[in-house]
């Protein structure tokens, strides 16, 4: 486990490097690192980069059981294009069954507590299993995605997951940079992005955004912006 001072030194060493170079160097230094992908725009950019600089890197996804068909479609297109294995992690059946039997199928819309309970079962617990034994994980977090992500650093100590290292190679990227990369490199992406979905999660918790709304406005749209995290990126 690295100290906060160690993390600061890593940021000083690597944070100024372009994202592909950043990934190549940190994955060589920390080989027991995996990419957590929800197959949004940022994540497919990272998959393309990793396929070019470190193709042996593990890629996993959290299949909550309530994803859009378009999300499964892009998973398959990515899998075929890059000839890679995608590790799916599912929630525990018994916990999902108990939740739906006692609270119904849309309890997450009734309160923040209920929504976090659903996210805990469908995302947070599977993530803990996916991260077991790793020294680091990679995410597609960007600072301009939401108020909850404004202070994201490229390298962080993830206290919520045992103090492992969290790498955010695109932390300082703007949305335009993400899409310029996708177009320039012909990266497969989720078709929902073309339908007004800049941020994509579970189907019942995601809608298209309206003109002038921020990129995360369609996620849990019934909640205030400062509450819009599922728990997997908890400090």
Image: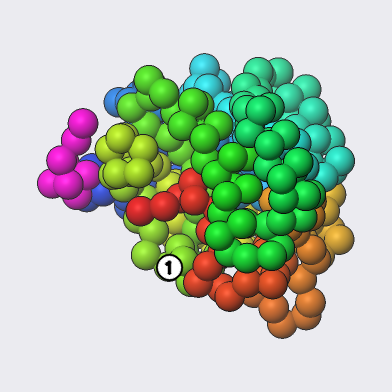
Give yes or no for residue 168 being in the magenta stretch. Answer: no
Q: Main secondary structure of the magenta part?
A: helix
Q: Residue at x 50, y 22 (%)?
A: 57
Q: Residue at x 55, y 32 (%)?
A: 126
Q: Is residue 168 left or right of residue 156?
A: right
Give the residue pinned by disc 1: 150
Most foreground residue, 216 or 26: 216
In the figure, 52 relative to 119: above or below? above
Most foreground residue, 168 or 219: 219
Q: Is residue 208 left or right of residue 114?
A: right
In the figure, 57 relative to 192: above or below? above
In the figure, 8 relative to 75: above or below? below
Quadrant occupied by the N terminus: top left
Report the span colored magenta.
1-8
Confirm whether residue 3 shows in the render. Answer: yes
Q: Residue at x 44, y 28 (%)?
A: 131
Q: Is residue 94 left or right of residue 23?
A: right
Point out residue 193 in the picture as x, y percentages from the top left corner: 78, 56
Q: Residue at x 84, y 35 (%)?
A: 73
Point out residue 64 in the picture as x, y percentages from the top left corner: 69, 38
Give yes or no for residue 3 being in the magenta stretch. Answer: yes
Using the rendered view, name the quadrant where residue 96 is placed.
top right
Which element is circle 1 on? Answer: loop
Tell me how many marks there are: 1
Q: How is the image coloured?
A: rainbow
In the figure, 24 relative to 149: above or below? above
Q: Is residue 89 left or right of residue 139?
A: right
Confirm whether residue 202 shows in the render. Answer: no
Point out residue 13 in the picture as x, y percentages from the top left corner: 23, 44
Using the rendered view, name the quadrant where residue 23 is placed.
top left
């Amino acid at each position: 486990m690295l100290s906060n001072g160690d993390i600061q030194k890593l940021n000083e060493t690597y944070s100024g490097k372009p994202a592909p170079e950043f990934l190549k160097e940190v994955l060589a230094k920390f080989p027991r690192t995996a990419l957590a992908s929800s197959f949004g725009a940022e994540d497919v950019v990272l998959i393309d980069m990793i396929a070019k600089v470190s193709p042996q890197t593990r890629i996993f996804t959290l299949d909550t059981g309530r994803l859009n068909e378009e999300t499964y479609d892009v998973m398959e297109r990515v899998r075929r294009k890059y000839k890679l294995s995608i590790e799916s992690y599912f929630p525990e059946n018994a916990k999902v069954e108990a939740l739906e039997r006692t609270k119904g199928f849309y309890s997450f819309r009734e309160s923040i507590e209920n929504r976090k309970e659903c996210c805990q079962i469908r995302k947070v617990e599977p993530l803990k299993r996916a991260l077991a034994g790793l020294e680091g994980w990679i995410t597609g977090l960007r600072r301009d995605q939401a108020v909850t992500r404004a202070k994201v650093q490229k390298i962080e100590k993830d206290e919520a997951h045992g103090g492992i290292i969290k790498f955010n190679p695109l932390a300082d990227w703007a949305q335009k940079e993400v899409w310029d990369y996708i177009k320039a490199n012909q990266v497969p992406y989720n078709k929902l992005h073309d339908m007004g979905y800049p941020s994509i999660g579970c189907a019942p918790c995601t809608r298209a955004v309206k003109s002038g709304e921020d990129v995360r406005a369609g996620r849990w749209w019934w909640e205030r912006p400062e509450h819009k995290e599922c728990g997997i990126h908890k400090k």
